[in-house]
Amino acid sequence: MTAVDPGGVPGPSDPREAQPGSPRPPAAAGAAPTELPESGGSSFLAGIMAEIDQEVRRRRAAGEFPPSFERRLDLLFSRFAPEGAKEGHFEQALSLADRAAYVDIDVPLRSNMAGVSLVKRVLRQLMAWYLNYVVQQVVRFTSATMRVLHMFDERLGELEEEARSRRPHPLVEEDRLPPAELVMALEPVPAGAGTSPPEPGAEVGEWASLVRLRLAGAGGRVLHTECAGGGLVAALVDDGVDAYGVEPRAHLLDLPSALGLDVRREDPLEHLRSVGEGSLAGLVLSGCVDHLPVREQRALADLAATRLAPGGVVMVVGTSPNRWAHSAPVIETDLAPGRPLHPETWCHLLARRGFSQIEARHGRREAGLALVPGADPGVSTLNANLARIDQALFGPASFTVVGVRGGQ
Amino acid sequence: MSPTGNGHHAVRPAVRAIHQFVPSLAPRDAIGSHTLAVQSLLGEIGFESEIFADEIKPELEGRAQPYARYRRRPYRPDTWLLYQSSIGSPIAGFLAERQEPKLLNYHNITPACLLEGWDPLVGESVTNGRRQLHLLAPGVPAAIAVSRFNREELRAIGYRWVTVVPPLIDLRAFDHEVDRQTAHHVEDARAGGGAALLFVGRISPNKAQHDLVKVLLAYRRAYDRAAQLYLVGSSFSAAYRDALLGFAAALGLEGAVHLTGSVTPEQLTAYYQAADVFVCCSDHEGFCIPLVEAMYHDLPIVAYGAAAVPETVGGAGLVLGTRDPVRMAAAVHRLIADADLRQALVAAGQARLADFRLEVTKARFAAAVEAAVGRPEDQRLVSHQPVDPGGVDHRSAARSPASHC
């Protein structure tokens, strides 16, 4: 029997030379069948899988498949699925409850036994007056209950709509594309277009090296949310960390997806809720901590405390509140649903949730107001005031807070 | 050791009868065939055995009775009731009220979250089925699961004595004449050089045929613009079938995706014989007999490793940890282009079939039943053997059902 070399690549040197349409070779007939290597079947198959992965990476890098190919296909399929088939089952449950709310008094008469149908028919007629009376009351009750449920649904829908209008959900943007545009978005992209790697750690700016240092050697999965262009994820992966990211803005994911990084289009809070308890070794929170409402930022702290394994590290990288208030566009800051918390507040939130070794650091200060030279008392007063203004306007642009989950 | 304890059968009378209860007894149906094979086996090892069903298809009238008839029978301590569980059924409630000890043969119940969005009534039925598993647990001293994946589900519910025996399949039943017309139809489609990808199973959301359409799209783009996908099986949900067709049409694949509907055994054989690769993206399978059928027909397999799929394949196919259509397409191409790999996997499939031969599974099922009912070792007709299955791929990591919902 012929054995396949587990270390080599059996078959044609270039798989594209094969003739897919040619009739299937009679594998088990005629020539003696090839066998998987007896002692190394799994490693042989693992080798094949690795080659398949390489092939996929090569084709993706060549632009044959746009980075969001699968996601857009999912989105396209969801256009043909009934409302709620892929996510959320409330509509279906309500519809089921609606149907179940009706009680049918006409019991079936069919029977496999001779004569029993007739008996059933007579019984049904005899009992109709009694059953009618009971069933009418039951149906009145179920109808009233369903009415309340529908009113509740309506009011909840209005509330959700209002909440959405206050904070446009990035996940919704692409969901509104018509199917034809989605199909167009599946087309290949020119080779090499948009596939240059992101700047390592760009999303966390000056804190990249600290984050990499603290998470080096993490003994499990590390999540970065919001991961934006995936620069930090890429840097951590380069360091040998099992890192992945979530980011709700779809367009930012094309590049990191193309590079084979594990980045997912998800809402940070929703993703963290879906993660198993104690399943993360590290968690980097950035972006979302600048704009989420306070209640949701507290939820982030809650989730960090439960989703991290004992000894897991949380790192909050945020914009300093003062800087955010003065540097962001006025309309944006006025209408934002939330604003960054001070690092002291994050320290408090993490401490209350059992984190230890909590440490806050402020980022670099940018050049502020120049002081007036001279030793005159008036100059000193002026400089003291300038220093206050400087502190208020040109404080550190960012901060980080690090904490370790207790219980190790 | 018996699940009823070492000394229990000392006071319990020898078991005389084991009657089966099944929600639906239908011909050309995996559970129907299994139930009939189990009945025959129980007779062979000395138990009286009748079948009771909620629904009996006309072709099998006479082989079973309506389960309600059992209501008239008085309790007998020498009788066990064996329930074939695969969906919600009033039979479960009926059995829960009976005094006789029960055996459960678990074929798996699809998680409701995969179905209810498409068909709320079926969703409710499977939810009910899972509720009934909880209801039955206290009165079921022993269970037989058709896969390790199913066993873990039962254990999570609270079933303590669960052994694994694959379904009783007569592999010879896969042998049929090839339907010439079907074979010509597939060959005509291949005339342009296109590979034929095949999946067999109900058109149902949990079988994720829409993911196979994605694989076809990726495969055609990267490797073979004339490739065809054959989806053999009846429709479970009109909404899902319509969505599948709409999706394929939107992608320009309406002429390349073939939904055959229900087919005859001869037509099915023609599809297996003519296809190049068996592809499977199912989200949830308690066992997946078509994988065994593909092995029988020397058709190599590319599958997504969900639920019981990895252990059924058992290393005799390419099982991927992702449904990424590009990766699946690359795996399909690799199998088609690499004759050595193909032959190796076909040979591995033939070897794997040995674990599913009827004489093997019957012996294991008999051993499991005799151990379950506490038949003394010296009276067993089948020599006892370890009932935990060998031949499964312990390395394959299946996704847990909870990850669906």
Image: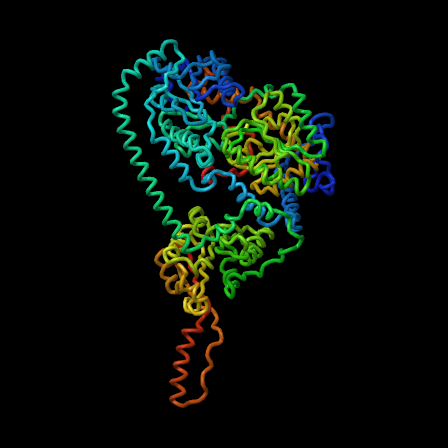
**Spot occupied by residue A294 in the image (x, y as percentages of width and height):** 37, 58
Task: Please tell me which residue is depicted at 35% across the width and 15% down the height of the picture.
Answer: B71
Q: Nearer the viewer, residue A97 or A200?
A: A97
Q: Nearer the viewer, residue A338 or A25?
A: A338
Residue that protrudes farthest toward the bottom in the picture = A376
User: Is A205 positioned to the left or the right of B136 in the image?
Assistant: right
Quadrant containing the N terminus of chain B in the rendered view: top left
**Spot occupied by residue A75 in the image (x, y as percentages of width and height):** 53, 44
Q: How is the image coloured?
A: rainbow
**Spot occupied by residue B243 in the image (x, y as percentages of width and height):** 53, 36
Q: Is residue B314 above or below residue A399?
A: above
* Number of on-image labels: 0
User: Is A175 positioned to the left or the right of A13 in the image?
Assistant: left
Quarter where residue B10 is shown: top left
Q: Is residue A308 above or below residue B93?
A: below
**Spot occupied by residue B170 in the image (x, y as percentages of width and height):** 57, 20
Task: Please tell me which residue is depicted at 74% across the width and 27% down the height of the picture.
Answer: A31
Q: Is residue A304 above or below residue B69?
A: below
Q: Is residue A62 above or below residue B161?
A: below
Q: Nearer the viewer, residue B242 or A310?
A: B242
Quadrant containing the C terminus of chain B in the rendered view: top left
**Residue A219 seen by the camera:** no
**Residue A163 seen by the camera:** yes
